[in-house]
Image: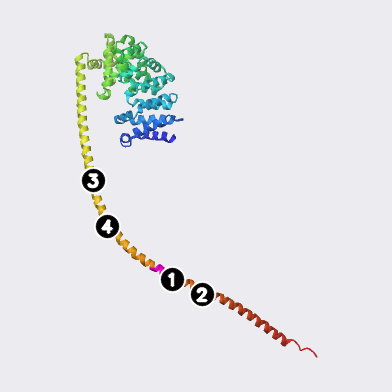
Amino acid sequence: MACVAEAFHAVARLAKADVAVQTRLGEELDACALVTGALRNLSSEKGCSGIRANGCMALQALADDNESNKIKLGEEGACELVLDALRAGADDDDIVIQACLAVCDANKSKLGAGIQSLIEVLHIKPDHEYAWLAISALADNYPPHQRELEGKGVVSMALQTARNAEASQIARQRALQVMAHRSELRKCSQKLAAEGACAIAVDLAKQLPPDEDTTEWAIMLISNLAETDNTLAMGAGEDLFALLGKELRALSEMEPSENNELHRNNLNAAVRYMSTDSIAVLRLSCAGGFERLVAALLAHGDTQERELRTSINRFKGKLKQLAKARDESVAREAAATEAVAAMRAGDLTQQLAAKEGADGDLAAARKEMEQWRTVANRQGDELAQQAADLVQKVVGVAQLQAELSEMKDRREQDEVDLLRLAQELTDGLRGTKRARTDPAPRA
């Protein structure tokens, strides 16, 4: 189990480290199918919390900003696995965090069933920042999920978390983000306005450390509330006008770009809808400057003609982008096909040349083998004759050894006989000598 969890963690680290590695993992190494298959087979075992958490981490890393991998993961059933992990590990913070992050990068259309699990997590821990992040990602510009959130108390929980000074900064920011997305619906915007969401947004933009996202979500919420005729319920405090004026000044110093276009449009809309009377206009001009206020009002526009023209221009731009992308894609595919064909032709040529060379080498090897076989046969005959001669020599040597052994035995017997004779001679000499030296017997 531990090695599988470590493998999931390694896949996540590699996918996050480099976009090229992430793409190769999905396209060449089939990591999408392997990770989902392993998670499906092992996540139901006992003690598998590490597998669930690291598996969700790997899925999130593979899907992050990679549409191809998202499609493959969706086809492999990764969304259902993430939801299963979220349900089964609701009491495990690591699993919930990784599952929520995976939800943010998964296919939205297949994750509607995860909303209830996220709501259950928030009931247990209202300031769970990753659960708020996942809910915001699911509801962002996706009406089916926005409808799914109806009647589940999400607005009330978001208000409670955003008000809670003891909640983490990120949790309060995510709750504000959810309120901003929910305020796009008239029914929710009315509830938010009545519950003081505008004041909460202004306070968060002031109290939390400077953060572009917090300010943008606050302005989005204010714009949506004002657009749905909630200006009276929102109030008209000095802090609200100060925030709008501050953002007017900040954006006037920036060049228009795609990165700040949505924020700029939301700010212009908020300024337009808050300019309900001369006093409000005066307060806005004091906070942001009269020229900036006029520019915001003109930029927002007040007629269907301007909105239609903007939409048409935007649509034309998208068509141009799509056409350019299509042409580039066709050119890339043609170039890739030609490159593959050329590479294949080169490979075939090399293979043919290698085959011809191999055939020649094989014929030469066979000829050389026959020569060696003839030599080996001749040498075999010679060795057989040498072996026969050697056997005869060995037999002769054995006979000589037998004769030498007999001679040795005879020699040893002769030595024994000589020793015995020598002993007898010695004894005889001693007797003779003794006889000479002994005196003659007296008469």
Compute the Cα span from label 2 to label 4.
58 Å
How many C-alpha atoms fall within 10 Å of the one at disc 1: few (<14), some, or many (≥20)? few
Q: What kind of residue is marked 3? A: Leu
Compute the Cα span from label 4 to label 1.
42 Å
Q: Which is more N-terminal, label 3 or label 2?
A: 3
Q: Which mark is residue 403?
A: 2
119 inside magenta stretch: no
Q: Which mark is residue 108?
A: none
The residue pinned by badge 3 equals 348
The residue pinned by badge 1 equals 392
Q: Which is more N-terminal, label 4 or label 2?
A: 4
Q: Which is more N-terminal, label 1 or label 3?
A: 3
Magenta span? 385-393
Q: Whole-percent x and y of residue 293? A: 25, 15
Q: What kind of residue is marked 1? A: Gln
Discs 4/3, front: 4
Query: SS at mark 2?
Result: helix
Q: Which is more N-terminal, label 2 or label 1?
A: 1
Compute the Cα span from label 1 to label 2.
17 Å
How many C-alpha atoms fall within 10 Å of the one at disc 4: few (<14), some, or many (≥20)? few
Q: Whole-percent x and y of residue 347? A: 24, 45
Image: 401 above or below 135: below
Residue located 31% across and 63% down the image: 374
Compute the Cα span from label 4 to label 3.
24 Å
Discs 2/3, front: 2
Q: Which mark is residue 364?
A: 4
